[in-house]
Image: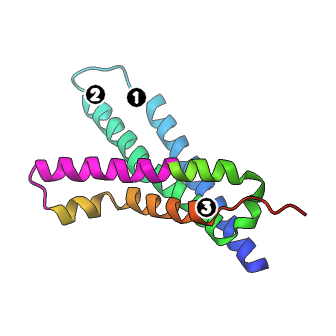
Amino acid sequence: MEIKKIVGIAFIILGIMILSFSSIQLILTKLSLPPYSTQTEGRYVAYSLQVYVFFFLTLPLVVSLFLAGFLVFPSMFRRFYVTVRALSALFAIGGFGITALLVGSGIANKIFPIFAVAGTSPLWIMAILAILALKKSKPQQEA
């Protein structure tokens, strides 16, 4: 029981650390941008790519770590089961929805479907973990 608790908390702490590091890096990059000109437009392009990586790679990874922490030790969150169920449903629908849109867009642009599915793996892995968390979250037992 103790090991499950430690592993669950470790997943959550790892997720918080990754989110903190990525957010600070994104903010520092934004603050260090020079005034826009034709000579500095490459930095703006690099910053916008970094924002895309944050939203489509880092955030699904962090959410997946939080969900994995919940799946390892769900009794730690029994007070928040309604919130966990609502967020899990939202992450499952959002993850599969965005995956379907991106894969469909990739196929329309003649990208091999295996590559399109593999490229969206952080999103559909998050959605699968959200479905598992939705099934595992149960109301608190009355004493």
Give the residue pinned by disc 1: 33
Is residue 87 shown in magenta? Answer: no
**Which residue is at a point 20% across and 66% down the rendered structure image?**
114
Mark sitting earlier along the chain (1/2): 1
- The percent coordinates of residue 126 (x first, y second) are 46, 59
Q: In the structure shown, which secondary structural element does the residue marked by tag 3 occupy?
A: helix
Please rate how many residues cluster around mark 1, counting C-alpha atoms within 10 Å: few if below 14, some from 14 to 19, many from 20: few
**Residue extending furthest toward the right:** 143
Against 72, residue 98 (above or below) is: above
Q: Quadrant of the N terminus?
A: bottom right
Q: Is residue 86 left or right of residue 48?
A: right
Q: Are marks 1 and 2 in contact (CB under 8 Å)?
A: yes
Which residue type carries mark 3? Leu
Which residue type carries mark 1? Leu
Give the residue pinned by disc 2: 40
Q: How far apart are the alpha carbons under marks 3 and 1? A: 29 Å
Viewer-nearest of discs 3 and 2: 3
Q: To which quarter of the image does residue 10 belong? A: bottom right
Which residue type carries mark 2? Thr
**Which residue is at a point 47% across and 39% down the rendered structure image?**
26
Give the residue pinned by disc 3: 14
